[in-house]
Image (spheres, rainbow, N blue to C red):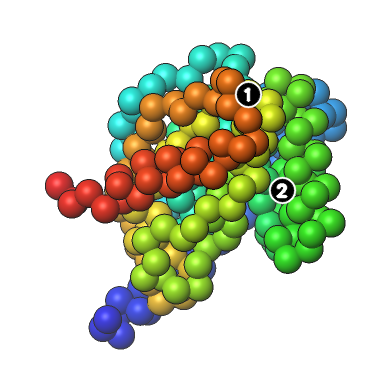
Amino acid sequence: MSIFKKIFAAFYRIYFYLIIALATIILFPFLIISILKRSWHPFFFKVARLWSVIIIYGMGCYPVIKREVLYEKGKSYMFVANHTSMTDIMLMFYATKNPFVFVGKKELAKIPLFGYIYKRTCILVDRGNTKSRVEAFRRAEKRLSEGLSVCIYPEGGVPDDLSIVLDEFKDGAFRLSIEHQIPIAPMTFHDNKKRFPYSFFKGGPGKMRVKVHKLIPTAGLTLENRKELKKETREIILNELLKPTV
């Protein structure tokens, strides 16, 4: 990579955080009001989608979404996708209108302004702490019982090795979906690793492709089926990632 591309990528990364700060400041009054009551989460979700639009387009990116299914209003789903970038958060908000709650790593709660909203609206988990994982699972169950959807990135984090196309999946999302008999709603994010990877000297504006796959039903499944369900979901996303670029 040339020195000029590295310099551009570094400035682009700084600009990304400035856009997040700007979008959060602009919408801060609405975000604060929306988190005063947990029952107002659908209102928060609408504001968060607008927040995501400001950031995505402010970065010079444009989403291209291909859908194999339309989600039913008022129905709960388990949203899962590959995880390669911080922009996965914004793109997931953009790609669906069904209010959901993120299960995400607690480290993001340290980001000024954004972190405050994040910890009030998401289920935080320390993936290296068993007690934290169990508590996050219980909180997710409660939110599902309230009629919301849940979003989990089943890789459990972004692999340190950026050459990994799709890491192995954890059980959590599939256990929850079976226990609550809600369908898995898989998505593939093609370009987020290119747009804004976890590498300081890489990234840039452009297209953000999303493939919204057919739902995977869980009706009638038991926890004994979770490994097959996990494997099926991972293969759908992996096969999409491996398709040649057109």
Instruction: Note whether residue 202 is visible.
Output: yes
| Front-lying residue, 33 or 173 | 173
| CA distance separating discs 2 and 1 | 27 Å
Left or right of residue 137: residue 51: left
x, y percent for residue 138: 81, 40
Instruction: Note whether residue 12 is visible.
Output: no
Q: Residue furthest bottom?
A: 3
Residue appearing at x 80%, y 23% in the figure: 39
| Front-lying residue, 46 or 152 | 152
x, y percent for residue 153: 56, 49
Q: Is residue 104 above or below residue 212?
A: below
Q: Is residue 150 above or below residue 82?
A: above
Residue appearing at x 50%, y 24% in the figure: 217
Element type where label 2 sits in the image: helix
x, y percent for residue 72: 51, 15
Q: Is residue 73 above or below residue 195?
A: above
The picture quadrant where one finds residue 143 is: top right
Amino acid, disc 2? Tyr
Q: Which residue is mark 1?
A: 181
Q: Which residue is mark 2?
A: 118
- Quadrant location of the N terminus? bottom left
Amino acid, disc 1? Gln
The picture quadrant where one finds residue 137 is: top right
x, y percent for residue 212: 38, 33
The picture quadrant where one finds residue 111 is: bottom right
